[in-house]
Amino acid sequence: MPRSQPTARQRRLGTELRKMRDAAGVTARRAAELIGTNPIQMSQVEAGKAGISEARLRYMASQYACFDTALIDSLVAMAGERGKGWWEEYRGLLAHGALDLAELEHHATHMRMLQASYVPGLLQTEAYIRALMAYAVPPLPPQHLDTLVSFRVRRREVLSQDSAIAFSALVHESVLRTRVADRKVAREQLAAILEQSERPNVTVRVIPFDVDGFGGAGNSMLYVGGPVPKLDTAQIDAMHGSFWMDAESELTRYRALLDKAEASSLPVGASRDFIHRIAQDI
């Protein structure tokens, strides 16, 4: 039976298989014939609504003349995932997009982020998270608010687990000076950022108000590295939802934007000193 609500990761697997087929100039009907199925089933595979076995995937790749072994192995690993991550505990309680983001972070090989609005989610304290969520209109029911807070707190574990990935955050000064709650919460949040930045896998750099040539305040984004560059993902939040990009042209653009923003930021040591000074001002 087709999946009624495939995850973003399942859809991405199907997208990559379709990209591979398109690059080979093979029709969906012909692809279905190659693996002994029908066009409807083939469409469901490429939409992430149906799974595919390792044998079939590797045979398809060979017929598409794809010799990128690392990419094929990565797709096979995605197709073979059977276990359910911790985020599945929240299915039915939170929006699918939130669960997809947690899964994306879990499988990341590295992450880069630019934030000119809020403290990056993986660096937020519980009090900061609660203040942000409580600002919603209309107000969230208390139980749902608690669920959202606990979910985001749990997402932070990706930075502290044994196989913690590299996380680089570019944060504008406005983010550090904005009080989403009161001074106590603001000071605790700045202290938490400094504490997290002491981890060997976490880098925080500040873009100050008085830097010249920074026009990227409207480009807040998350860039997530996949097991191979072709499986990278760029994600942008908006008021009415989030947008995920995986086309090579889009990924190239967002990498360039992050590089430009990084060029406007202070070095790591200077950024830490800068955050210390802001904490003393609040």
Image (tube, rainbow, N blue to C red):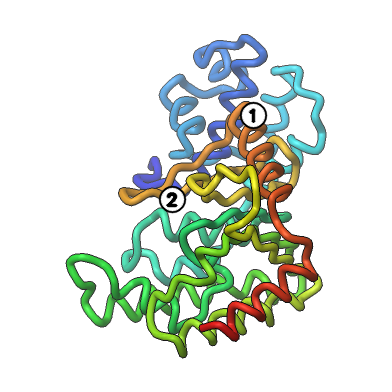
250 or 117: which is nearer to us? Answer: 117
Identify the residue at horizontal 71%, vertical 50% (top origin). Answer: 262
Q: Is residue 2 above or below residue 252?
A: below
For label 2, the residue is: 237
The quarter in which the N terminus is drawn is: top left
Q: Position of residue 198 (x, y in %)?
A: 76, 78
Identify the residue at horizontal 65%, vertical 56% (top origin). Answer: 107
Q: Amino acid at mark 1?
A: Glu
SS at circle 1: helix
Identify the residue at horizontal 38%, vertical 55% (top origin). Answer: 96
49 or 264: which is nearer to us? Answer: 264
Identify the residue at horizontal 59%, vertical 53% (top origin). Answer: 114
For label 1, the residue is: 248
Q: Position of residue 58 (x, y in %)?
A: 72, 31
Q: Position of residue 140 (x, y in %)?
A: 23, 73
Q: Is residue 73 above or below residue 22?
A: below
135 or 171: which is nearer to us? Answer: 171
75 or 36: which is nearer to us? Answer: 75
Q: Residue furthest left?
A: 138
Q: Tally the marks.
A: 2
Q: Give the spatial CA distance, label 2 vs label 1.
A: 20 Å
Taking the image as shown, residue 94 lies to the left or right of residue 229, namely left
Q: Is residue 179 above or below residue 264?
A: below
**Mark 2 vs 1, N-terminal side:** 2
Q: Looking at the rendering, which quadrant does residue 130 occupy?
A: bottom left
From the viewer's perspective, is the residue at label 2 or at label 1 nearer?
Answer: 2
Q: Amino acid at mark 2?
A: Asp
Label 2: few (<14), some (14–19) or many (≥20) C-alpha neighbours in 10 Å: few
Q: Looking at the rendering, which quadrant does residue 129 occupy?
A: bottom left
